[in-house]
Image (spheres, rainbow, N blue to C red):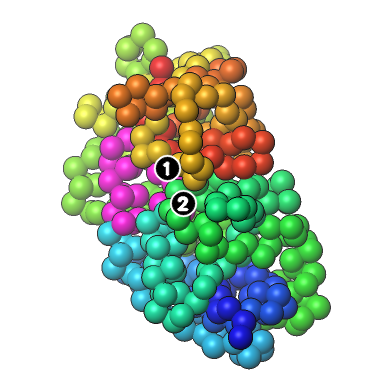
Amino acid sequence: MPDKVLVAMSGGVDSSVALLKIVEMGYDAIGVTMKLWEYHDVGGNLLDDSNCCSVGAINNAKLVCDRLNVPHYTLDFTDVFQKSVVDNFADEYLAGRTPNPCVRCNSLVKWDAFVQQADKLGAAYIATGHYAKVQHLKGSSVLKKGRDTLKDQAYVLWGIPAHTLSRTLFPLGDLTKEEVREIARKNKFETAEIPESMEICFVADNNYKRFLKEYIPEKMSEIGAGEIVDESGEVVGEHSGYTDYTIGQRKGLGLSTPEPRYVSNIDPSNNQIRIGKKESLTKDNCEVSGVNWLVDNMSFPCDIQAQIRYNSPVIDATITQKDHQFSVEFAQPQIAVTPGQSIVFYKNDIVLGGGIIEKNY
C-alpha cells in the first residue's frame, strides 16, 4: 500500500504541479489548503484569485484535486497565523525593523501544522510546491537549493524545524518555473496561467502603510511626522512617520541633494530617520538572533556562504559564536544589511540554517 502524502495546495500553478508529481510518483495524495487570512478584515484586493487564502484560490486548489481524483480539505489556521505572523509583522514595523513574514509563516505555522495534520490523517510525508530540494541521507536529511537559480526558494525555508526534513518532499526541486507552467498547460489545469503573486498574502494590494493603519490604527495614529537627520545629526527634512521607511530606501524622502541619499538608520524611540550617501549603508558585520540550524555538528568559527535578502547574491562570510550569540563577518562589505530580515547560511548548495539580522556595525 503506497505511503500517504499531504500536499499543500495554495491554489497556484506550483502547488498544482507538485500534486501531480506526487501522484505520478505513486503516492496516495491528499490535498490540503490552509486558510490563513480573511481579506475583508483589513482591506486589500479582495477579488484577485492569485492571492493565496482567497476564495478563488481555494476553489482552484479543489478543482485541481478533483481533476486528479485526490481528496481536498481546507483547514482554518487564521488564529495562529494572526498571532504568529501578522501581529509580529506589525510589531516589527513599530520597532523600526523590516520583517519577512513568509519565513515566519513557514517556520511557525505551516510546517509544524502540516506535520501534525499528516499524523492525524496517517500520512508519512508532507509536500509543497517550493523550488527547493531535500536530500535524504543515511540517518539525516538536508535542505538544498532548487535547480532553477532564478526561482530557488531555499532562502525562505531556513526556519522550518530540522526534524521535519525527513518527512518533507519538494517535487519541483529539479524543475524550472517555465517547465512547471508547461506541465500545467499540458494537463489543462485551471491554475496554469495564474500570474505569480509577488506580494505578502495578507497585504493583497502591497500597500503596507494602508495595512498598518487599518490593522493597528491606535498605535499608528500616535506616530506623526518626525525629523530626517544626516550622518552628522543635523536636521535636513521631515518625514511622514518612521514606519513608512526601510533601510536602504531612496525614494520618497522629499529631499533635494547633489548626490542620492538613502535611509541608513531608523530610530523609533525618537521617530527619527537618518540618511546618508550610499557608502553609509555598507556594513562589515551583523549580529544574528533566532538561529535555526538544519544540520548537526556545527562548530565555530565557521566559514560559510551567506545571503542577506531574497534574490541577493550569496557571499563568503565567517560566523562566530560567543555566549550563545552569533555574529557574521562578511568577506566584503554589504549594502543595506537590514534588521528584521533573514540571513541564511550555506555550504555550496546545502542550507546550513539561518537567523534574523539584528544590529550591524
Marks 2 and 1: CB-CB under 8 Å?
A: yes
Q: Residue at x 39, y 67 (%)?
A: 113
Res 119 quadrant in image: bottom left
**Which is nearer the N-term, disc 2 or disc 1?**
2
350 in magenta: no
Mark count? 2
Mark 1 — residue?
292
- Residue 257 visible, this angle: no
Magenta region = 84-104
Q: Position of residue 97 (x, y in %)?
A: 36, 37
Residue 120 visible in the shown view: yes
Residue 96 lies in the magenta stretch: yes
Tell me the amino acid under the disc marked 1: Asn
Q: Name above or below for residue 185 compared with residue 214.
A: below
The residue identified by callout 2 is 162
Element at label 2: helix
Residue 346: give x, y in percent of width and height.
Answer: 59, 36
Q: Nearer the viewer, mark 2 or mark 1?
A: 2
